[in-house]
Amino acid sequence: MPLDDVVISRAIIERFTQKLLDHLECDVAIVGGGPAGLTAGYYLAKHNHKVVLLERKLSIGGGMWGGGIMFNEIVVQEEGRAILEELGVATLRFRDDYYTADAIEAVSTICSQAVKAGTRIFNLIDVEDVMLTEKQVTGLVINWSSVTLAGLHVDPVTMRARFVVDATGHVAEVAQIIARKSGARLDTSSGGVVGERPMHAEIGERMILENTREFFPGVYAAGMCANAVFGAPRMGPIFGGMLMSGRRVAELIAARL
Ligand SMILES: Cc1cc2nc3c(=O)[nH]c(=O)nc-3n(C[C@H](O)[C@H](O)[C@H](O)COP(=O)(O)OP(=O)(O)OC[C@H]3O[C@@H](n4cnc5c(N)ncnc54)[C@H](O)[C@@H]3O)c2cc1C
């Protein structure tokens, strides 16, 4: 049968529209498709929760593709290695408790596992605001990244979620939005986003797990965002903390669902 160009277009439009409609309400909406967000998505979806992940860029993976200074190798410690192995990413012992993995294999495999577990990823979507009641965040306000980039005057739409994960990395965008727009206090020492501290891998990796928690009703911080929100050191190009934080936030939210 000859290919019909319009049938191809119809297939894309109908399937995408259905996918989006099916996910306008979900258990957990994760903002940011870096290692923390993807790992959180994997563990939540694996336990049959309805999970949506929103990423503003075309590609998923956040800052993991580039390893350190664009050398596409990542370093993890033992706990991070165990997560990578569970996900099917090959690791290589460097020495003592230091392991490496190929960054490309890591991103593509974690993403694949998250999707196969059931996480529905929407890329090219910018989270520009939250839905807020007096008590808590109830969802997200989303638009196409291209609309934001072009500065077009186009209204967004909304997505309802029982819980939101801010996994936007250093910028901590969801936390910044809540603090800036609502005037409400976050559950941090300053009541706002404290901001990350200078590099200290040992403390940063330890604190990221303590900082992976709810900072505003309905909203959790994960990954680099957690240390940015609560004011802990950055940790340099070691990625175990991102993976462990993603798993931790999934455990915390799953316990409440
Ligand atoms: C300035 C800078 C410093 C860094 N320092 C460190 C460091 O000290 N230690 C370290 O381990 N790594 C560092 N990195 C590398 C990298 O950011 C992290 O290692 C790691 O990728 C963080 O993982 P993550 O999952 O928390 O967030 P990221 O990998 O950063 O992923 C966050 C994702 O969220 C998306 N996003 C952000 N805002 C929105 C929004 N509003 N809507 C939709 N999507 C959104 C971004 O496009 C991105 O893909 C640094 C990167 C930068 C840019």
Image (cartoon, grey):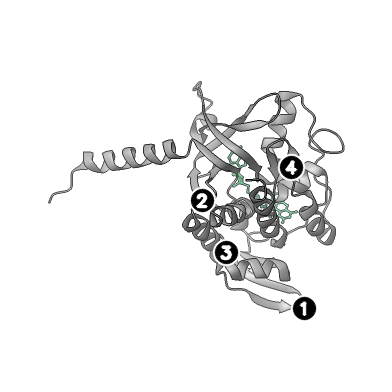
**Taking 24 as reference, is 76 left or right?**
right
Estimate the spatial distance between the alpha carbons at disc 4 and disc 1, rounded to whole Å: 34 Å
Estimate the spatial distance between the alpha carbons at disc 3 and disc 4, rounded to whole Å: 27 Å
Would you call the spot at circle 4 few (<14 residues within 10 Å), some (14-19), or many (20 or more)? many
Q: Amino acid at mark 2?
A: Thr
Label 3 with label 4: CB-CB less than 8 Å: no
Q: Which residue is mark 2?
A: 119
Q: Amino acid at mark 3?
A: Ala
For marks 3 and 4, the one nearer the N-term is: 3
**Taking 195 as reference, is 26 left or right?**
left
Q: Which residue is mark 1?
A: 96
Q: Residue at x 32, y 38 (%)?
A: 14
Between 190 and 105, the residue placed more toward the observer is 190
Between 100 and 122, the residue placed more toward the observer is 122
Q: Amino acid at mark 1?
A: Asp
Would you call the spot at circle 3 few (<14 residues within 10 Å), some (14-19), or many (20 or more)? many
Q: Which residue is mark 3?
A: 106
For marks 1 and 3, the one nearer the N-term is: 1
Residue 90: horizontal and vertical position, in percent? 58, 73
Q: Residue at x 82, y 51 (%)?
A: 233
Nearer the camera: disc 4 or disc 1: 4
Above or below 237: residue 185: above
Q: Which residue is mark 4?
A: 214
Q: Secondary structure at mark 3?
A: helix
Above or below 124: residue 100: below
Would you call the spot at circle 2 few (<14 residues within 10 Å), some (14-19), or many (20 or more)? many
Residue furthest to the left in view is 1
